[in-house]
Every structure is written in C-alpha cells, then in structure tokens.
Image: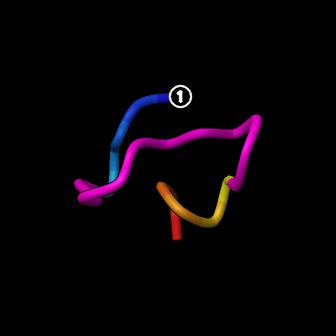
Amino acid sequence: MLDLSGSMEPCDVTSSPSLGTG
C-alpha cells in the first residue's frame, strides 16, 4: 500500500499496518 496519510514510515501491511496508516 502507499503512504496516503503521508507517514514517515512505509506502509508495510505484511509487517505492521499501523505503522504506515496509523
């Protein structure tokens, strides 16, 4: 997935979806 929220960390759904999307 892409950084739609403009987070600093990449959206790694395979690792932690909360990192990118928050």
Residue 6 horizontal side relative to residue 22, left or right: left
Front residue of 16/2: it is: 16
User: Looking at the rendering, which quadrant does residue 8 occupy?
Assistant: bottom left
The residue shown at (53%, 28%) is 1
Numbered disc total: 1
**Against 13, is 8 above or below?**
below
Residue 20 horizontal side relative to residue 4, left or right: right
Q: Position of residue 11 (x, y in %)?
A: 50, 42
Residue 11 horizontal side relative to residue 7, left or right: right
Circle 1 packing at 10 Å, graded few (<14), some (14-19), many (20+), is few
For mark 1, what is the residue? 1
Q: Position of residue 10 (x, y in %)?
A: 40, 43
User: Looking at the rendering, which quadrant does residue 3 occupy?
Assistant: top left
Amino acid type shown at disc 1: Met
The residue shown at (76%, 35%) is 14
| Secondary-structure class at tag 1 | loop
**Against 11, is 8 above or below?**
below
Front residue of 22/12: it is: 12
Q: Is residue 15 magenta?
A: yes
Q: Is residue 14 magenta?
A: yes
Q: Main secondary structure of the magenta part?
A: loop
State the residue lying farthest toward the right.
14
**Against 22, is 6 above or below?**
above
The residue shown at (67%, 54%) is 17
The residue shown at (70%, 55%) is 16
State the residue lying farthest toward the top.
1
User: Looking at the rendering, which quadrant does residue 13 occupy?
Assistant: top right
State the residue lying farthest toward the front.
15
Colour scheme of the rendered structure: rainbow
Question: Which span is picked out in magenta?
Answer: 6-16
Residue 6 horizontal side relative to residue 1, left or right: left
